[in-house]
Amino acid sequence: MRSTKIKLSVMCAVAGLLVLSAALATGAGATSTAAVGSGKASATKSVCGAGTGKKATGKPIKLGGIDMLIPGVDFTTIGKFAAAYFKCVNDNGGINGRPIKYILYNEQLNPTQQAALAKKLVESDKVVGIVGNTSFTECGTNWKYYKSKGFTVIGAGVQAECFGTPTFVESNMGPRYSNIGAAQALVRRGAKSLMVASPDTISAYADGGVLKVAQAAGIPGKAFPIKLPITDANSTILQLVQAAGEGGGVILDFTPDSAPALMQAAIAQGLVDKVIWGSSTPIANAFMAKQFGAFDGKMHINQEFGNINDGSPDENLYLAITKKYAPSISPQAFGQMGFMDAKFAVQALLSVKGQVTAASYNKAVRALKNVKTSMLCKPWYVGNALPYHIPNNTDITVTYKAGEVVTEDKCIPIQAVDPELTQTRKWETQFNLNTGK
Amino acid sequence: MISFATTTIFGVDWIFLKPYIVVGLALGGVYALSGVGVVVLYQATGVLNLAFGAIGAAGALISYYLVNHTSTPHWIAYLACVVFGAIVNVVYGMVLGPAFAGRDPLVKMMGTLGLALILLGVMAWRAPAGGAFVRVLQLPTSNHRYTVFGATVNLTQILALVFALVLTVGTTAFLRFTKIGTAMRALASDREITATLGVPVRRVELAAWLGSGIVCGAAGLLLADLFTSLDYTALTFLVISSLAAALIGRLQSLWVTLLGGLAVGLAQAVATPYSSISAYRTAAPFVLAIIALLYLGRHRTVTLSRTAG
């Protein structure tokens, strides 16, 4: 009798645990059945692929991607959104009737794993192209391999090799140029110093530009490499604010996985009004704005893309795709990156004449120029045979306001503190890469 | 080198150092709190609970969910974290405790590592981390701020320290003056002899699991706030600092564990403004635990034997 009671109580407790575990779910939104991305593309409307509204049923065209997922940083949102875009294309006629099959792998900041996954995609999965890659180190690991196979990768870059080798062409500007944009925004607002904190894995590359901006402005600058995951946000934010001094500038270069800890620590310690705050792109989204009202008008974020709610054709399509195909992904910059990566890849696929093969697709990618998207200030391009690509080099500054992200400064060229940026702008004019000609 | 003329300590102005001391003491308080919970459980059951952080993190996620996605009164949501800690610990103690009772401490410890991994898996599955899921669990006490010696302190930080002190005093008194506390101390000395003396071993062990679980839930709640972000991976591995505190107390002394926890928190925070050591401050728990173990074991005799022939 007694043991039955014990068993019953254990079963009740286990059942309770299961219920509580289920409560951990953050809920999923309902899916809509409305046709998304169909119709005729125009200056005021973007569509998915051909926009036919008919499901593609032919033999799938395989594309692949690799995104990093480690404690404190989740880049899989980019690949997940690219997948959502491809679903929309598949529901709108696909690529001349053929659907896109997108294979997305996650890696854990492990070069051996990165190399193996790239090889798997190209040689085992036999994808025709690589799209939507984002990682702290994958560009450095795989660029030579992709080059040897004739692949040109459309992704969202982080490290130097993503913007310094011929293999990768990124829709974003990456942390270095994004941090420069944030630094410029703070200098415009009278910052007396520039302190920048990035994950230690990328700090040397990502923060170097800010120090050059500080030097050019004649103010002190210092970089703080931070180990992820952040386990002492209070001390870290204190260190940054103290180093910046009264009226100084502090730039946070973290994803929404890690930035909240630092921002919450600043609020908890009453530091929000001590300095001028800046950030790279990843925290420019409504869910951060809603969470951190204390930073309204005080956090100046370099937004590499247009504001999500600006009502432009691509932003509208982006929101529609989110609603139907990716309801669990809150509108954010990483989603925009996935959207653009997929859009550019689809444009290349649609321009292929004849058989879609790895050779024909990648040739089409390399031929892309003057690709219009309302998400960027200027058209995007790849440009044949360039030794490196920085096609997104114009920034928008945004801030938080009553739970929304609002634009402060629009389409300001990233300060050419690096010679690569000066050279890039020469190529843009010389080869008419983004001039619309 | 302390310079009183300029009020700098090893080159860092005292004014700049003060806030780090506040932050360090608050975090240290929670490490101490957790460490005391770990020691009490170890004393009564011989189990070094590696799932301490994971249980607290899962409890904090449940509180977060109840606060942000339901109309549950907030105090009930916070209480849920503590109750969750207690339930998980008691269920583990009831179901797996007896099976592990006669095994090596290492095997017992590995059992809790299994629990930690299961909880981590459940959290990753049901509450994935990532860009779309910013989670901050701020206790209402964090809105009450005071200036102490020129540094900003919030009520949660004060509570963390007070809880650690109260728990240490309370547990010491409990172990010394209550019947079940005496039984726990007896269990720590010898489980078998205690059992033969008629002490209800299972019930005493369950009481230890329950007490430790409550502390575990409370620590998870406080850490989620003090840590400033509900990153369950980081919260899970903060158990390392608590274990360091427990090791400094040699898994025996509650008071030394309290001091160890405070020392770990302080060392981590105060090292921050010193640029030469700042990058290594996360190693503070390990360094302090090693120093303490070497110092406390300095009078131990090591006997070496050699087989003849």
Image: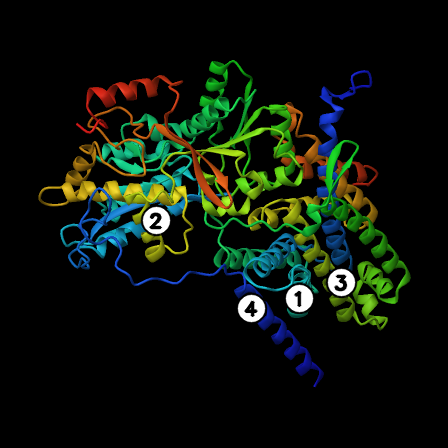
Between marks 1 and 2, how big is the CA–CA gap?
39 Å
Q: Name the quarter where the N terminus of chain A is drawn.
A: bottom right
The amino acid type, in three-letter code, at marker 4 is Leu
**Disc 2 vs disc 4: Cβ atoms closer than 8 Å?**
no
Residue mark closest to the camera, 2 vs 4: 2
Secondary structure state at the residue bearing disc 1: helix
Count of marks placed on residues: 4
Nearest the viewer among A76 and A418 is: A418
Quickly name the residue at label 1: B87
Q: Which residue is mark 3?
A: B208
Specify the amino acid type for callout 2.
Phe
Q: What's the residue at 69%, 46% (across, down)?
A: B143
Q: Which residue is mark 4?
A: A18
Q: Nearer the viewer, residue A71 or A243?
A: A243
Structural distance between the alpha carbons of marks 1 and 3: 12 Å
Q: Are marks 1 and 3 in contact (CB under 8 Å)?
A: no
Q: Is residue B173 left or right of residue A253?
A: right
The residue positioned farthest toward the bottom in the image shown = A1
Which residue position holds label 2?
A: A81
Label 1: how many Cα within 10 Å (few below 14, some 14–19, many 20+): many
Chain that bears disc 4 = A
Q: CA distance from mark 4 to mark 1?
A: 12 Å
Residue lying furthest left: A354
